[in-house]
Amino acid sequence: MGNIERPKSKQPIPEHAKKVFSGVLFDVYQWEQELYNGTKSTFEKLKRPDTVVVFPVLDNGEILLTEQEQPGKEGSFISGAGGRVDQGEDILDAAKRELLEETGYEANEFYLWDAQQPSSKLEWAVYTFIAKGVKKVAELNPDAGEKIKLKPVKFEEFLDMATEKKFLEKEVVGKLFEAKLDPKKLEELRELFKPN
């Protein structure tokens, strides 16, 4: 797969910005920004570790999702396997690690489906992969703050997830809606999610 390019932010943190707060998950940066009328104002942006999401495709064509609970979140949510990229960790290595931890599966092939920074006020990239040639090699090994149940779904059910409130992966909802509305995009997506 080679080097994965990090998507650019629509409002990058300038080099002269100062980090004014270091948190457990979020850091806060501020800088003086000249406005159109020549006055200046303090701009601010959060920064957090990038994340990966993996949608494994089983040999029978089902897509393996997770149903998760986490402390402090109301109710459960449905998502792909995924989580934070550790500092210095390669993006693909993070995807492989998260897939193994949250599902107990390994995969022969990873396809980068989407990479974006979903918010201009937050320096944070989300990389979404499709994994194929998957095989169960271990038991789930979730973080202490996760309860995870595996939820295999058929392709059509996966498309319908776009309209469910519990579906966490908002970055790909647009792609799922496009496929529901455009027969050509539906066939492209169906092909993308075919098992090898």
Image (cartoon, grey):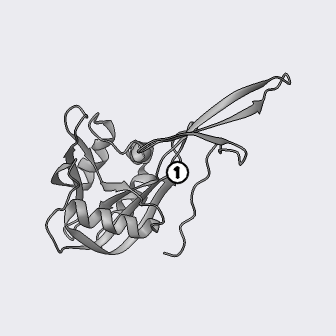
**Residue depicted at 51% across the width and 48% down the height:** 124
Q: Which image quarter is the C terminus in?
A: bottom left
Q: Which of 190 and 16 is in front in this view?
A: 16
**Residue depicted at 44% across the width and 48% down the height:** 175
- 140 left or right of 95 in image: left
Q: Nearer the viewer, residue 95 or 85?
A: 85
- Residue occupied by mark 1: 116
Q: In this view, does 44 lie above or below 175?
A: above
Secondary structure of the residue carrying numbered label 1: strand
- 125 left or right of 68 in image: right
**Residue depicted at 53% across the width and 47% down the height:** 117
Residue 37 position in % (x across, y down) = 84, 21
- 12 left or right of 182 in image: right
Residue 91 position in % (x across, y down) = 45, 65
- 79 left or right of 1 in image: left
Residue 116 position in % (x across, y down) = 52, 51
**Residue depicted at 65% across the width and 44% down the height:** 13
Q: Can you tell which quarter of the image residue 42 is in?
A: top right
Residue 155 position in % (x across, y down) = 26, 55
Query: Is residue 24 shown to the viewer in this render?
Result: yes
Q: In this view, does 160 lie above or below 43?
A: below
Task: Give the number of marks.
Answer: 1
Badge 1 local density, few (<14 within 10 Å), some, or many (20+)? some
> Which amino acid does the dot numbered 1 rest on?
Gln
Query: Is residue 62 shown to the viewer in this render?
Result: no
